[in-house]
Amino acid sequence: MQRAAGLVRRGCRPRAPGPWGRRQSSAAAEASAVLKVRPERSPRERILTLESMNPQVKAVEYAVRGPIVLKAGEIEMELQRGIKKPFTEVIRANIGDAHAMGQQPITFLRQVMALCTYPNLLDSPNFPEDAKKRARRILQACGGNSLGSYSASQGVNCIREDVAAFITRRDGVPADPDNIYLTTGASDGISTILKLLVSGGGKSRTGVMIPIPQYPLYSAVISELDAIQVNYYLDEDNCWALNVDELRRAVREAKDHCDPKVLCIINPGNPTGQVQSRKCIEDVIHFAWEEKLFLLADEVYQDNVYSPDCRFHSFKKVLYEMGPEYSSNVELASFYSTSKGYMGECGYRGGYMEVINLHPEIKGQLVKLLSVRLCPPVSGQAAMDIVVNPPVPGEESFEQFIREKESVLGNLAKKAKLTEDLFNQVPGIHCNPLQGAMYAFPRILIPTKAVEAAQSHKMAPDMFYCMKLLEETGICVVPGSGFGQREGTYHFRMTILPPMEKLKTVLQKVKDFHVRFLEKYA
């Protein structure tokens, strides 16, 4: 406009638009008119929908972080917004997350991790020499002396050597570092081995035997792989014992519709807390040998044994003590991690599996499968190394380490007994002895009227119970239906990890709620 005005003042006129300018103007007007009359398009259909997604993934369920936990998160948000509840906090007793529940880290483990993460601290006088020695050894085995580098897919070599030395000390049986695979927690190892094992179709599809109740990782991976879940029931009336006759029943019935190839054992049990006797383990190994089953021994709670009448026996140790007929033939994968025990280092996602009697050609296939995910987190591998290579007598950190370890395990033993005793004082609740692990799995009476109320809400009865418990007390536990249970029985899983005083409060609140629940639905 300013340019046109200047031209007029000088006696000139702005140039009229030429044919090209008119065409541009006309085209713009036509486009505008077309846009005004063209009907709006409906949004394009999504490629990925519930109908089109992988049906195996859709079938996966994981109760430990299921609907009850989502509801707990909603309630926490409401509390933060100032919405009044009959309680001031949500207590997440649904998962075995020790540090989240207030357990303090083991000093030595964190010292070595700090040194590995920030090697400049190796010059600091504030760290003990035994911690520095371990950190230097780990870093020297890492590319560029850094935890930030990739490792071999099977794991850092010196850490696998330390794991093998740990197993040898524990069992009195030699372990080969070449049979050790470092993993992202134990869960990664379990799902990897199952991927190798699942094959066939129809009646030849792989059947995977799992205990009921079970840790939901197993049913989730079985669903994802479209394998066949074969349930065997633990004996609740006999402290959740494993009965070989029940294994035989399960295999016999499964052979009608699948090929049972895998037997999963959780010892100590999750969620049931039982510790298997040596005789039971012998019977299981003999059964696996007899039926030609690949054994998976989930031993992540091996440090968590509380009953004075029980002790942990590894499947590897018992297998070798049974003689070469078994030790040379039974295929066994055993699992351990940093997440449980006295360490409780869930977030590092450190773990290992030892796989023995694996066919040499399958070993190559396993390494290939592991190489797809490059390597487990190297920080988690380092944490696993400290667990299997702790301070020993004569080293400066030994006394503090043993004091902290025994304190954690001693407190857990006290809390296990307290939980059992208090639950068994409540009418309508029965709790077996917590021999090991980190959970109570009490059986609860749910009256018929409550079952009907649950059905009207399209909920399993124990889910209805746990949801009411959460809404009225702020306590988050997991319904037994998420772990599996015999028809007509109801349970929930609750961790014993909260500090002693808070645990007492939790148990009292559960007691008061249960009495009210029975009165309401009597």
Image: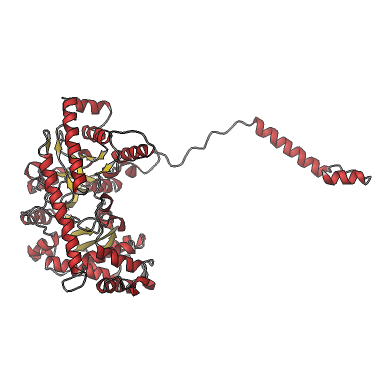
In the figure, 101 relative to 428: above or below? below
In what quadrant of the picture does the C terminus appear? top left
Residue 436 visible at all: no
Residue located 70% across and 37% down the image:
31
Taking 214 as reference, is 459 above or below it?
above
Residue 316 at what x, y percent from top left? 14, 62
Q: How is the image coloured?
A: secondary structure
Give percent across and percent down for residue 426. Answer: 12, 35
Q: Position of residue 360 (x, y in %)?
A: 24, 66
Which quadrant of the structure image shows residue 42? top right
Extreme residue toward the right, this view: 11
Q: Position of residue 104 (x, y in %)?
A: 25, 56
| Nearer the observer, 184 or 365 | 184
Q: Nearer the viewer, residue 440 or 245?
A: 440
Residue drawn at (40%, 40%) of the image: 52
Question: With 321 as the anchor, is 108 left or right in this view?
Answer: right
**Which residue is located at x 43 percent, y 42 percent?**
48
Left or right: where 237 falls relative to 383: left
Residue 28: in sight, yes or no?
Answer: yes
Q: Quadrant of the N terminus?
A: top right
The image shows residue 8, relative to residue 358, as above or below, that is above
Q: Does 24 sit above or below residue 193?
A: above
